[in-house]
Image (cartoon, grey):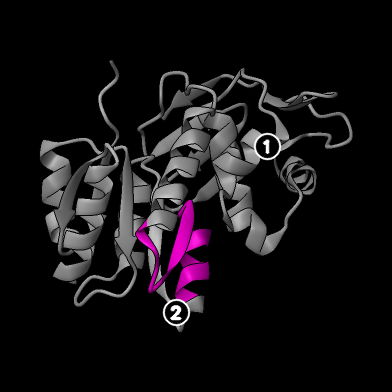
């Protein structure tokens, strides 16, 4: 039997932590709670949750900052808990990598449904080949500084990347050689944010090709597979 999914719940309100952890436990999940970002970091040092439920508004370090830290160090799925008045923070959270969000006050049953949906989507994604943990990555004639999101060519000339372009490129680098469908690329780069911004994967690929291909009209790094999706063909290595 597979172990029950492990959920990390981060919220500064004890009543929410108690209510949600009890409800999820009753439905077969293992739950660890943390009252802030520091407590979550300590939790991650001793265990490996499958998903993080993260409140945006917390005293001290807020959920946006915690999300940025998680995205720079892990691929953990993240569901934000947000108040109605926090629309800007919610959008920022989705842009930096949250997979979904739920507005307070919420029904624990809806949170359970969203957790199931995110885990199902994540588990359906193709496996990464030799996950790249380095802060810098080389491919073809390019050097990508992951932490600073800087792309530089062999002549030392930098090319600016939008958030969407960086996340698409990183998805290709993490899954080099694999054919990724449009739906898989959407999940890898946007998650629920796709609903908020409605950006076409084909348009994103076209924009990225214009920046990294020698001839975008005859691409050799990002190949199109008609009816299938796209694949990244270049050799990828840690710099």
Q: Is residue 27 left or right of residue 77?
A: left
- Tell me residue 19's x, y (percent): 21, 61
Task: Give the camera-side residue of 153 and 77.
Answer: 77
The numbered mark at residue 86 is 2
User: Residue at image x 27%, y 36%?
Assistant: 28
* SS of the residue under disc 1: helix
* Magenta stretch: includes residue 97: yes
Height in image: 99 above or below 188? below
The numbered mark at residue 12 is none
Query: Badge 1, how many Cα within 10 Å: few under 14, some, many 20+?
Result: some
Height in image: 103 above or below 218? below
Q: From the image, which quarter does the C terminus lie in?
A: top left
Spot the residue most to the front: 26
- Tell me residue 141's x, y (percent): 62, 31
Magenta stretch in the rendered image: 88-108
Task: Give the camera-side residue of 99 and 163.
Answer: 99
Q: From the image, which quarter does the N terminus lie in?
A: top left
Q: Which residue is mark 1?
A: 183
User: Do tag 2 and tag 1 residues touch (Cβ < 8 Å)?
Assistant: no
Q: From where the camera sits, is residue 145 visible?
A: no
* SS of the residue under disc 2: loop
Task: Give the camera-side residue of 168 and 189.
Answer: 189
């Amino acid at each position: 039997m597979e172990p029950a999914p492990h959920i990390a719940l981060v919220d500064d309100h004890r009543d929410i932590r108690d209510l949600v952890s009890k409800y999820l436990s009753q439905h077969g999940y293992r739950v660890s709670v943390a009252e802030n970002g520091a407590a979550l970091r300590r939790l991650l040092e001793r265990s490996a949750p499958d998903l993080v439920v993260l409140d945006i508004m917390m005293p001290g370090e807020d959920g946006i900052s915690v999300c940025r830290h998680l995205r720079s160090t892990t691929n953990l799925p993240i569901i934000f808990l947000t108040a109605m008045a926090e629309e800007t923070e919610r959008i920022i959270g989705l842009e930096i990598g949250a997979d979904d969000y739920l507005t307070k006050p919420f029904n624990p049953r809806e949170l359970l449904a969203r957790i199931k949906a995110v885990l199902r989507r994540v588990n359906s994604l193709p496996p990464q080949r030799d996950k790249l943990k380095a802060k810098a990555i080389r491919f073809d004639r390019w050097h990508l500084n992951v932490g600073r999101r800087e792309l530089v060519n062999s002549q030392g000339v930098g090319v600016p990347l939008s958030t969407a372009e960086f996340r698409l490129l990183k998805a290709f680098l993490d899954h080099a050689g694999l054919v990724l469908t449009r739906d898989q690329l959407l999940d890898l780069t946007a998650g629920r944010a796709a609903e908020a911004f409605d950006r076409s994967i084909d348009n994103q690929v076209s924009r990225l090709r214009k920046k990294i291909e020698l001839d975008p009209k005859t691409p050799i790094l990002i190949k199109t597979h008609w009816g299938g999706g796209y694949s990244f063909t270049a050799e990828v290595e840690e710099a």
